[in-house]
Image (cartoon, grey):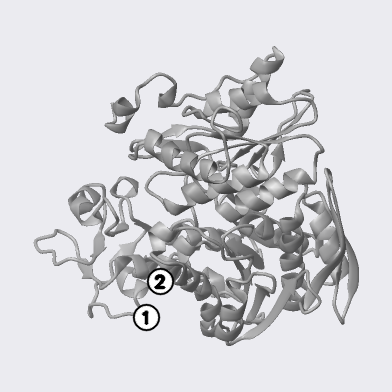
């Protein structure tokens, strides 16, 4: 517990002087989460302005308010700041007594492969008998405790990140692997995380709606590496190492010039500092040799696809050159990872074809996922996916083009249409499929309801085929209108398979597209 005055003792931005010594028992950005003694931080978002909920926060027990607007007549102290979103991470860091300074913090960023690489690094740390935690878009792992990080999240909010780090430090952990997204960086959620090692998987087309341009998107990712320069010295030392992908044409040259700290790269070519050779693919995993001038080690992983060779290399390179872990121990950690929820996750209920759920929701992720599927079967590849509403519109066409090129059959369906017209989204995707020679009703179909789309794909499947449901992965909800409906692609796949096989299984989750017209759910009825 700290006072309001103490929260700003190391605050790096302008703030009012003479703050009172009021005890603060917690920090909240949602007035509904405020409890007695809390500081309520009012932030302005795309559709919600936290300043309109200040009185509600006070009614719920807030003893102080931080905001950006001129406010008068409040019954509690008001701290006016230039940017509360940017400030939140520093206030939370101070509140939790700067937990990142007590930990070795490894940050992982990129468009695709972040969660996998984060999990690989976490397994390597455990194999090295290091007391480590992990924060990913799927969950936070603190010792034996696994915390759900939410329905539709990128990097958790700044005060949640600091709370997780504090829990780790209090539990005696010494290291943490933290998955960081471009949203997390652009919204300053991880600015006070004191990173020691930064790892990049790749930078491909994604989030253009959020960042406006590829250059802005790349710059948001690059903040992980510029932050390494500002990490304060730690008693346990801090390596300040950047790990980048030599094979990624859209990021390597830029980052290689941009990064000012020590750096090392990985890739498949001979010019990479750490490279993969003798690569073998099978339906059950990958096998390759990781080597450079210092070592040569065999790597076996139950992950599939060429893109996971890169993810394994990224994790191994960070562990060996950033943390001094032996390549042999790193190989043991990689082999220990059985799989990741919603990442090429097989759903087997006895059917004579392969059913897989994957998170691929970008053009590049869909491309490498379909390529991986080709290495797993001599049969056909059937893909099911959508494209989110109120998000990057260009990728709708791009993803449909990719599937038309690489899959045998494509089913276009819903993926978080939000307040956009689902029919309109599917029209844009269908145009992309046709531009690559797709024939509607023969090589691709539009099935608006996602559950029905999965059922339809199973009816098309022949023995030995692969049915891939992409885009949702581990996520636990889907947004129609402004409402999040409980949805899990893995449950939906099991429900559809049970129906297909005539066996007991879960019930298909409900979506409004099952029984409401589009116009009804668009207006929230």
Picture layout, residue 229 above or below residue 7 = below
State which quadrant residue 7 falls in: bottom left
Relative to 141, is 88 on the left or the right?
A: left
The one of 164 and 358 positioned closer to us in this rendering: 358
Query: Mark 2 and mark 1 in contact (Cβ < 8 Å)?
Result: yes
Do we see residue 191 in this rendering? no
Instruction: State the separation of the CA atoms marked 1 and 2.
Output: 8 Å
- The residue furthest top is 502
Q: In this rendering, is residue 416 above or below 456?
A: below
Please indicate whether residue 386 sits to the left or right of residue 324 in the image. Answer: left
Q: Nearer the viewer, residue 497 or 42?
A: 497
Name above or below for residue 289 compared with residue 483.
below
Q: Position of residue 93 (x, y in %)?
A: 45, 69
Q: Nearer the viewer, residue 421 or 29?
A: 421
Residue at (59% x, 63% y) in the render: 178
Query: How many labels, in total?
Result: 2
Residue 72 seen in render: yes
**Residue 507, horizontal then vertical, whole percent:** 57, 19
* Residue that appears at 30% across and 67% down: 84
User: Which residue is depicted at the point 90% across and 68% down?
Assistant: 297
Q: Please tell me whether residue 91 is drawn above or below residue 142 in the rendered image.
A: below
Q: In the drawing, what numbered circle is on residue 12? A: 1
Residue displayed at 22% across by 67% down = 68
Q: Which mark is residue 90?
A: 2
């Amino acid at each position: 517990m700290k006072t309001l005055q103490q929260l700003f003792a190391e605050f790096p931005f302008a703030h009012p002087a003479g703050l009172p010594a009021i005890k603060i028992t917690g920090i909240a950005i949602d007035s509904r989460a405020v409890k007695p003694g809390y500081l309520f931080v009012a932030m302005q978002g795309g559709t919600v302005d936290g300043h309109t909920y200040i009185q509600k926060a006070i009614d719920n027990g807030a003893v102080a308010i931080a905001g950006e607007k001129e406010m008068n007549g409040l019954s509690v102290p008001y701290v006016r700041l230039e940017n509360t979103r940017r400030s939140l991470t520093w206030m939370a860091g101070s509140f939790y007594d700067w937990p990142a300074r007590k930990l070795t913090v490894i940050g992982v960023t990129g468009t695709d492969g972040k969660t996998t690489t984060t999990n690989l690094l976490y397994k390597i740390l455990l194999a090295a008998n290091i007391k480590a935690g992990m924060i990913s878009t799927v969950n936070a792992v603190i010792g034996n405790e696994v915390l759900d990080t939410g329905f539709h999240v990128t990097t958790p909010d700044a005060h949640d990140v600091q709370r997780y780090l504090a829990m780790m430090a209090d539990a005696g952990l010494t290291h943490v692997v933290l998955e960081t997204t471009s949203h997390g960086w652009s919204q300053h959620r991880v600015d006070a995380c004191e990173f020691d090692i930064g790892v990049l998987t790749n930078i491909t087309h994604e989030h253009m709606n959020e960042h406006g341009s590829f250059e802005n998107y790349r710059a948001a990712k690059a903040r992980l590496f510029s932050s390494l320069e500002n990490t304060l010295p730690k008693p346990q030392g801090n390596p300040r190492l950047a790990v980048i992908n030599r094979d990624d044409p859209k990021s390597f040259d830029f980052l290689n010039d941009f990064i000012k700290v020590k750096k090392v790269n990985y890739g498949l070519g001979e010019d990479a500092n750490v490279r993969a050779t003798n690569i073998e693919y099978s339906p059950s995993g990958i096998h390759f040799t990781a080597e450079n001038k210092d070592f040569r080690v065999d790597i076996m992983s139950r992950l599939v696809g060429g893109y996971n060779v890169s993810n394994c290399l990224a994790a191994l390179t960070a562990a060996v050159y950033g943390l001094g872990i032996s390549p042999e121990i790193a190989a043991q950690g990689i082999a220990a990872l059985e799989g990741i929820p919603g990442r090429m996750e097989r759903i087997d209920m006895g059917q004579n074809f392969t059913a897989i759920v994957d998170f691929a929701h970008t053009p590049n992720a869909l491309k490498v996922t379909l390529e991986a599927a080709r290495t797993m079967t001599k049969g056909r590849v059937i893909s099911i996916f959508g494209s989110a509403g109120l998000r990057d519109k260009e990728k709708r066409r791009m993803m449909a083009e990719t599937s038309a090129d690489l899959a045998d059959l494509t089913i276009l369906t819903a993926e978080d249409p939000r307040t956009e017209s689902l029919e309109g989204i599917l029209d844009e995707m269908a145009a992309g499929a046709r531009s690559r020679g797709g024939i509607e009703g023969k090589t691709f179909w539009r099935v608006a309801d996602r559950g029905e789309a999965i059922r339809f794909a199973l009816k098309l499947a022949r023995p030995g085929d692969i049915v891939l449901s992409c885009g949702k992965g581990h996520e636990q909800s889907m947004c129609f209108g402004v409402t999040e409906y409980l949805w899990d692609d893995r449950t939906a796949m099991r429900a559809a398979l049970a129906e297909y096989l005539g066996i007991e299984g879960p019930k298909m989750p409900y979506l409004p597209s099952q029984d409401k017209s589009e116009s009804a759910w668009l207006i929230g009825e």
